[in-house]
Amino acid sequence: MTVSNEPNRGEAQRLERVYEQLTTLLNQPAVAQRLRTAPGENE
């Protein structure tokens, strides 16, 4: 019995796109600055 890798391949490609999008966002100075200065839940 052969297990299809298609669902796994699709998931891997989706995760790669998410990683690329996050990398692009985090490399934008304004976004990175907002994340650094965002108040936490306990503040």
Image (cartoon, rainbow, N blue to C red):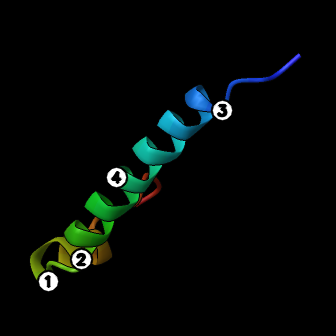
The label shown at residue 17 is 4
Residue at 39% from the left image edge and 60% from the top image edge: 19
> Which type of secondary structure does the marked residue at label 3 adopt?
loop
- Residue 20 shown left or right of residue 16 in the figure: left
**Can you name the residue that lies furthest to the left here?**
30
Which quadrant holds the C terminus?
bottom left
Which numbered tag is attached to residue 5? 3
Measured as percent of width and height from the top left, residue 15 is found at 46, 48
Q: Is residue 39 visible?
A: no
The quadrant in which residue 14 appears is: top left
| Residue 41 image point, x, y percent | 43, 52
Q: Mark 2 highlights which residue?
A: 32
Q: State which mark lies toward you, 4 or 2.
A: 4
Q: Which mark is residue 3?
A: none
Q: Residue furthest front?
A: 1
How many numbered discs?
4
